[in-house]
Amino acid sequence: LMEMTTRDKMSQAIFSEDADGRGVEGGALMSCRDVPPSVLEEKYKAELDFFKKKGTDLRKESLPVRPACHFLMGGVKINNDCSTGVEGLYACGECAGGVHGANRLAGNALVETLVFGDIAGESAAEFARGHDHVEAEANDFIESLPKEFGTDGEDIIESLRELAWNRLGIVRDGDGIKGSIEELDDILKRLNSLPFSDLEQYFQTRNMAHVLRCIATSALAREESRGAHFRRDFPMTDPRWKAAISIKEEFKTTLEPR
């Protein structure tokens, strides 16, 4: 399908070209010179005008493009009423997993937010009307927080971003995933002794590391390629893996056939 292929295949191609040293500015060059001027000026007039204001004429010049992470298809497991495994907690939108399957269809994100947002709101309101409060034990959580803060933990966050892109991003393989798990486990163990400027930065880092560990766990378990999940060591889709991966406590996985 060449340039008309799906976004995951296009992203894999651009990522691989750059990784092999043939990229441009971390991506590739996109040319519109073979697109009929009438199509550009009618269907893509807004884009033409936007880039022209930036000094680029799409009818004559190539545009550097590169893939980026812009949607998370995994997330908290929800029931039909958007309730979760935590009493009184409801989830919807991008933080809720399983709605899109292996690859989100274009345009479905906003629809998902409206549909499941409405369900979650109604369900949460109904729960609130029937409960004065919910008991929660917070002592263990409070004890898990760091007692002192350093000056700067931004380098830790940046290292997590690099790990996510290079080992758990568009193109994955078993060795890279295993290496990321080792590094993430080390960070999670040392969280309370790492330097953070404040509690907000600590929570941001802890959440990033935890979500990445979940991604790495499921990516290592799924020995196939499906949708946006691509492993170069298992490049084909295997029908035996037509299932969702749920991650329990201590990052233990279970399969739920679809």
Image (tube, helix red, strand yellow):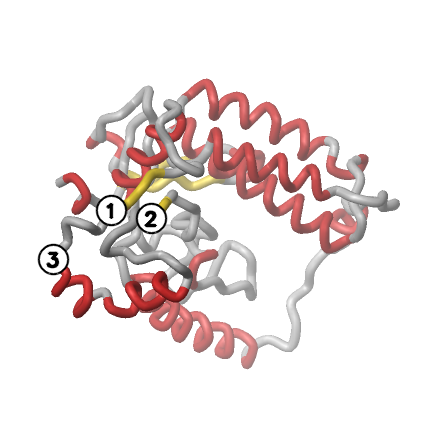
What is the CA distance from the residue labelled 3 to the residue labelled 1? 12 Å
Disc 1 vs disc 2: Cβ atoms closer than 8 Å?
A: yes
The amino acid beneath tag 1 is Ser
What is the CA distance from the residue labelled 1 to the residue labelled 2? 6 Å
Q: Give the image location of residue 72, x and y in percent.
A: 43, 50
Residue visible at 65% across and 67% down?
Answer: 134
Q: Is residue 142 left or right of residue 81?
A: right
Q: Which residue is mark 2?
A: 63
Disc 3 element? loop
Q: Nearer the viewer, residue 74 or 166?
A: 166
Q: Which residue is mark 3?
A: 36
**Quarter occupied by residue 187:** top right
Tag 2 or tag 1, which sits nearer the N-term?
1
The amino acid beneath tag 2 is Leu
**Quarter occupied by residue 239:** top left
Mark 2, residues whose alpha carbon is within 10 Å: few (<14), some, or many (≥20)? some
Residue 31's label in the rendered image is 1
Q: Is residue 61 left or right of residue 71?
A: left
Tag 1 or tag 3, which sits nearer the N-term?
1
Q: Is residue 152 left or right of residue 247?
A: right
Residue visible at 23% across and 65% down?
Answer: 44
Residue visible at 42% across and 71% down?
Answer: 117
Mark 1, residues whose alpha carbon is within 10 Å: few (<14), some, or many (≥20)? some
